[in-house]
Amino acid sequence: MSDEREGKKEELPSFESLYVGRFKIDKNLRVVDISDESARILNCTAADLISKEFTADFGPGKNLFEDFLEGKVQICECKMVDGTSCNMCFRIKESSNGKGFDVVFAKECPPFECHDGESLHYRELLVKSRDLENHALFLENLFANIGYDLKTPLGIILGYCELLIKSKASASGSVDTERALRTIYRNCAWIADIVEKLELLVSLVKRGKGENKIWLDIKMYLQETISRHTRTSFAKMTRIETDKIDDIKILASPTLISLLFDEIIKNAVQFSRKGKEIVINLIRTDEKVKLTVEIASLEEEIPPLNHFIERLFPYTYDPKKDDYSTKVECLGLGAVKYLAHLNDFSFEVKRKATGSEVMILERKV
């Protein structure tokens, strides 16, 4: 709850920077409540505005008040308490208690100016509202999958523990105790690994979001990541190839961009079948930067990658191995999607007619 409150506080300066304020008026159209922040936009204090009549003291006539109440967005000249005037946009709706009206106003001030009866303030606020709503929905869908990642190994652990308890109670000795303990140990290690990765992800994301965004040479970051993973992919004899890598610069966080590229290539190596190749391209078209990572052939028994696009952690351990020390060292495609979102990239997975899978990152530049 404290994080939610902090998030709301962080939004206030952005609204103020758009010269947006609000106040309440009663049925007689007199101001009954206004914050100090909103009053400052009007070059006065809250006390100066209490009891002022909206249509008489501010300037908009009653005909404009009716237009505002119907949701029409237009500008009008508004008188200030200090005698000056400026153009304003108003949005008005009836209060939830039915005893007055809520007024949201936007002061016309460069670069947020209103033209042809349309409020740029209003459009900016709609965009910001939609962005916040989409981000909340994105996180809700993403982290809902953590429960699945944790319940899978927990279910196995509980099942084997139940078998061991029943076996001891019946003294039948029909359960392979060593195998059961190894399975329990392996799945506990899996859960510990998930928690460790989640802590690391949160730490890196927090650090990256605290950085100042700078102009980054994406080609350099990508080539460094490819070079690093070309060496580590030898275990699977996976070749990392590039057809085209354009010189592209974007404004971004160095930590978040490095983490994004690192995870998308590690996932590609993880999913690629032994002895096959991964082809990476970075191009700029139609004011967009587009990164594609094509996996020629998936590892055996792995479904299409869009099956994993919401999963924050890797799909599973290799079911053919009973080595409980085995670890998957990358995050899942759900984490890649999350990191892409933080870097203003869209992320999707497509299957080509040849059967290969392509992970696509796109961003406006």
Image: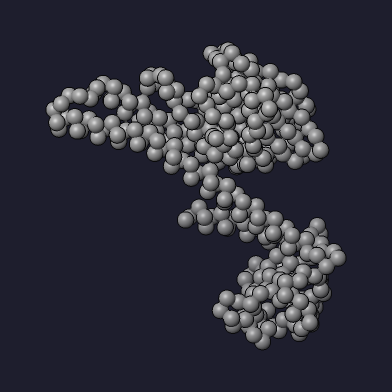
Residue nearest the observer in this picture, 4 or 286: 286
Residue 242: where, in percent of width, then height?
A: 71, 20
Residue 249: where, in percent of width, then height?
A: 76, 33
Q: Is residue 193 left or right of residue 364?
A: left
- Residue 99: name its quadrant: bottom right
Tell me if residue 304 comes above or below residue 7 in the rendering.
Answer: above
Which residue is found at the position 54% from the left and 39% from the top? Answer: 310
Q: Is residue 46 visible?
A: no
Which residue is found at the position 77% from the left and 69% from the top? Answer: 73
Residue nearest the observer in this picture, 355 or 227: 355
Which residue is found at the position 52% from the left and 55% from the top? Answer: 4
Which residue is found at the position 53% from the left and 43% from the top? Answer: 142
Residue 353: where, in percent of width, then height?
A: 68, 27
Tell me if residue 302 comes above or below residue 256 in the rendering.
Answer: above
Residue 89: where, in percent of width, then height?
A: 76, 69
Tell me if residue 355 comes above or below residue 336 in the rendering.
Answer: above
- Residue 190: name its quadrant: top left
Q: Residue furthest right?
A: 116
Quarter of the picture containing the C terminus is: top right
Residue nearest the observer in this picture, 362 or 260: 362
Q: Residue furthest front?
A: 353
- Residue 347: name its quadrant: top right
Q: Is residue 97 left or right of residue 40?
A: left
Q: Is residue 321 left or right of residue 95?
A: left
Q: Is residue 100 left or right of residue 195?
A: right
Tell me if residue 186 comes above or below residue 347 in the rendering.
Answer: above
